[in-house]
Amino acid sequence: MKPVMQDAFGELGNCFSACLASLFELDITDVPNFYVTAGRDDAAAWWSAVREWLRPRGFGVMTLQWADPKLIGEFEGWFIVCGESERGLQHATIWRDGKLVHDPHPSQCGIRSPESVDLLYPLDPGAMLPRSAR
């Protein structure tokens, strides 16, 4: 993971794009602002654009909603955690092993409480294994 900061803010912010750029160790310019490409008012179109971007990279994404934010400590590995920021907007951050490790917003304030977790998963798990393990 290479921390990348978002460069668009407010209603059309690109914090989620910055999280993907960070996880894939890309520049922010290599990941589209999905609110610009798919629109802010259509969640299905937004997620479709995210999945289209992830597919050629061999990944999909699934979202889990939280009833109990303390359960986030049960997850291992890297994941994107979303929730309300101190600015009153939904915000995406990167966590590892249940702890915040990167906030792409310059304020570095994170989120008030985890509301959802976006997990990236390999579309072909076998392709992730070394040849000797297949």
Image (tube, rainbow, N blue to C red):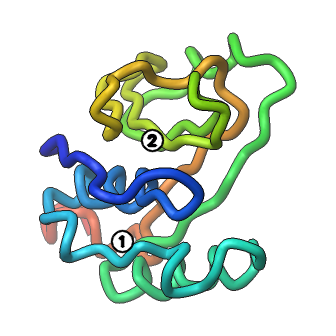
Q: Position of residue 49 (x, y in %)?
A: 54, 84
How many numbered circles are shown? 2
Q: Position of residue 86 (x, y in %)?
A: 58, 22
- Residue count near mark 2 (Cα–Cα under 10 Å), binned few <14, some 14–19, many ≥20: many
**Above or below for 1 versus 42:** above
Q: Quadrant of the C terminus?
A: bottom left
Residue at label 2? 79
Q: Nearer the viewer, residue 104 or 99?
A: 104
**Above or below for 57 versus 14:** below
Tag 2 or tag 1, which sits nearer the N-term?
2
The numbered mark at residue 95 is: none
Q: Position of residue 27 (x, y in %)?
A: 13, 65
Residue at label 1? 126
**Above or below for 73 versus 11:** above
- Residue type marked 1: Gly
Query: Mark 2: which secondary structure?
Result: strand
| Distance of label 1 from label 2 (alpha carbons) | 21 Å
Query: Mark 1: which secondary structure?
Result: helix
- Residue type marked 2: Phe
- Residue count near mark 1 (Cα–Cα under 10 Å), binned few <14, some 14–19, many ≥20: few
Question: Which quarter of the figure has residue 57?
Answer: bottom left
In the displayed structure image, the side of residue 18 where residue 30 appears, left or right:
left
Q: Quadrant of the N terminus?
A: top left
